[in-house]
């Protein structure tokens, strides 16, 4: 009785019954890696434009907020200076300037908010 002996060793994974030939190069793992990289690149092509748009909107909104905050601060400091100067004048106080600045502050606050 002659036994056929392969020179190639085989490994059996007991659960699936699949024989894996150890003499084959590990090209299957590199093809899986290539497939994963291709999927990652395809996903990035779909996601990247939307992510960049969201980032641009985020940055613009924050810069606009900083600009508005600086504008309000500058406007209030200048108005405060004018009101202090007008109220400090006893005899030369102009009621029209005080009323005008008060109305302008109210309108400015209402237009911003």
Image (cartoon, rainbow, N blue to C red):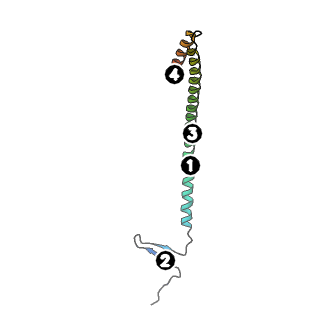
Q: Nearer the viewer, mark 3 or mark 2?
A: 3
Q: Is residue 37 above or below residue 71?
A: below
Q: In which quadrant will I find the N terminus?
A: bottom left
Q: Secondary structure at mark 2?
A: strand
Residue 112, percent across and down? 52, 24
Mark 3 to mark 2 CA distance (whole Å): 53 Å
Disc 3 and disc 4 in contact, CB within 8 angstroms: no
- Please report whichever mark, 3 or 4, sits nearer to the chain's N-terminal start: 3
Crowding near pointer 1: few (<14 within 10 Å), some, many (20+)? Answer: few
Mark 2 to mark 4 CA distance (whole Å): 81 Å
Residue under the point 58% across and 34% down = 63
Mark 3 to mark 1 CA distance (whole Å): 14 Å
Q: Is residue 15 above or below residue 100?
A: below
Q: Secondary structure at mark 1?
A: helix
Residue highlighted by disc 4:
109
Residue highlighted by disc 1:
44
Q: Nearer the viewer, residue 5 or 73?
A: 73
Crowding near pointer 2: few (<14 within 10 Å), some, many (20+)? Answer: few
């Amino acid at each position: 009785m002659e036994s056929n002996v392969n020179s190639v060793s085989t490994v059996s994974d007991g659960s699936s019954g699949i024989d894996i030939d150890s003499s084959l190069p590990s090209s299957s793992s590199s093809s899986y890696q290539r497939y994963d990289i291709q999927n990652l690149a395809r996903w990035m092509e779909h996601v990247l434009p939307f992510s960049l748009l969201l980032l641009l909107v985020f940055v613009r909104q924050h810069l606009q907020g900083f600009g508005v905050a600086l504008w309000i601060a500058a406007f209030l400091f200048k108005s405060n200076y004018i009101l202090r100067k007008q109220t400090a004048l006893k005899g030369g106080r102009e009621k029209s300037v005080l009323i005008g600045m008060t109305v302008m502050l109210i309108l400015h606050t209402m237009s911003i908010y």
